[in-house]
């Protein structure tokens, strides 16, 4: 009876160890997969070649991926919008090939920003409704398979900056966090394997 109970406990320990090892490896693998980078666009004063005569979306032509946010940061000191073009509003502009529509308001204070996440691939021309297409416009080429998700809502997030900068703020790095998560996953896997090996060794000695 004692031997059967002992074997049952050691078997349970082995199963627990294997489970921990699998879970740890899963965590480590997930953390190792890099997240898709977001697209950053800066609004500046002064015209740009092919992108407007008064203000500039920089870069004038950007690329993005379905499901990842595009963020516009205002460094011109004047309020703007980021609005998808229509044939009436943007005379002479090519028709957008994607089905998303957007209208993001950007505050006047330097550092104010707004974001939009595309759900359908395509080429989109956009402009500022305050200053007009001729004054400023840009293009975004969105790649990735179309999804059945409803059009994403614009999420403006105005935030005033007390010390204006001539360049857009850098996005926070998540490399350290993902590295720590991966290390934790490997430690869990190692603990699980050690538990399983100890349980198997005890069974063999008995």
Image (tube, rainbow, N blue to C red):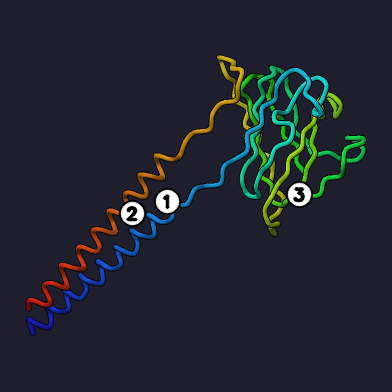
Q: How far is disc 1 from disc 3 in space, using C-alphas?
A: 30 Å
Q: CA distance from mark 3 to mark 2?
A: 38 Å
Q: Are marks 3 and 2 in contact (CB under 8 Å)?
A: no
Element type at mark 2 = helix
Q: Is residue 76 above or below residue 60?
A: above
Identify the image quadrant of the N terminus: bottom left
Marks 1 and 3 close (CB-CB < 8 Å): no
Q: Earlier in the sequence, mark 3 or mark 2?
A: 3
Q: Classify mark 3: helix, strand or loop.
A: strand
Residue at 76% over, 49% down: 122
Corner quadrant of residue 28: bottom left
Alpha-carbon span between mark 1 and mark 2 = 9 Å
Pinpoint residue 191: horizontal percent, then vertical percent.
Answer: 23, 58
On the rendered image, what quadrant is the C terminus found in?
Answer: bottom left
Residue 12 drawn above or below residue 83: below
Residue farthest toward the front in the current orientation of the protein: 49
Q: Which residue is mark 2?
A: 185
Residue 111 pos. (x, y %): 61, 23
Q: Residues within 10 Å of mark 2 (few under 14, many from 20)?
A: many
Residue 31: which numbered mark, if any? 1
Single out the residue that lies furthest toward the top. 163
Figure quadrant of residue 37: top right
Residue 150 in the image: state x and y as whole percent: 71, 54
Dot 1 lies on which element?
helix
Local crowd size for mark 3, using a 10 Å CA cut-off: few (<14), some (14–19), many (≥20):
many
Local packing at callout 1 (Cα closer than 10 Å; few below 14, some 14-19, many 20+) is many
Which residue is disc 3 drawn over? Answer: 122
Circle nearer the N terminus (1, 3): 1
Q: Position of residue 72 (x, y in %)?
A: 66, 31
Determine whether label 1 and label 2 are within 8 Å by CB: yes
Q: In the figure, is residue 73 to the left or right of 171? A: right
């Amino acid at each position: 009876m004692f031997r059967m109970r002992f074997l049952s406990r050691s078997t349970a320990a082995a199963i627990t160890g294997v489970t921990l090892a699998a879970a740890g490896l899963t965590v480590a693998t997930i953390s190792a997969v890099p997240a898709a980078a977001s697209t950053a666009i800066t609004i500046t004063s002064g015209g740009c070649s092919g992108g407007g005569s008064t203000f500039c979306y920089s870069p004038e032509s950007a690329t993005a991926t379905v499901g990842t946010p595009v963020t516009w940061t205002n460094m011109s000191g004047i309020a703007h919008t980021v609005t998808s073009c229509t044939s009436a509003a943007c005379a002479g502009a090519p028709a957008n090939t994607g089905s998303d529509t957007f209208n993001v308001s950007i505050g006047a204070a330097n550092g104010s920003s707004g974001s939009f996440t595309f759900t359908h691939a395509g080429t989109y021309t956009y402009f500022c409704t305050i200053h007009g297409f001729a004054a400023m416009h840009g293009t975004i080429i969105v790649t990735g398979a179309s999804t059945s998700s409803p059009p994403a809502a614009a999420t403006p997030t105005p935030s005033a900056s007390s010390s204006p900068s001539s360049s857009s703020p850098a996005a926070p790095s998540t490399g350290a966090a993902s590295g720590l998560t991966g290390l934790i996953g490997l430690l869990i896997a190692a603990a699980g394997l050690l538990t399983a090996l100890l349980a198997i060794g005890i069974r063999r000695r008995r």
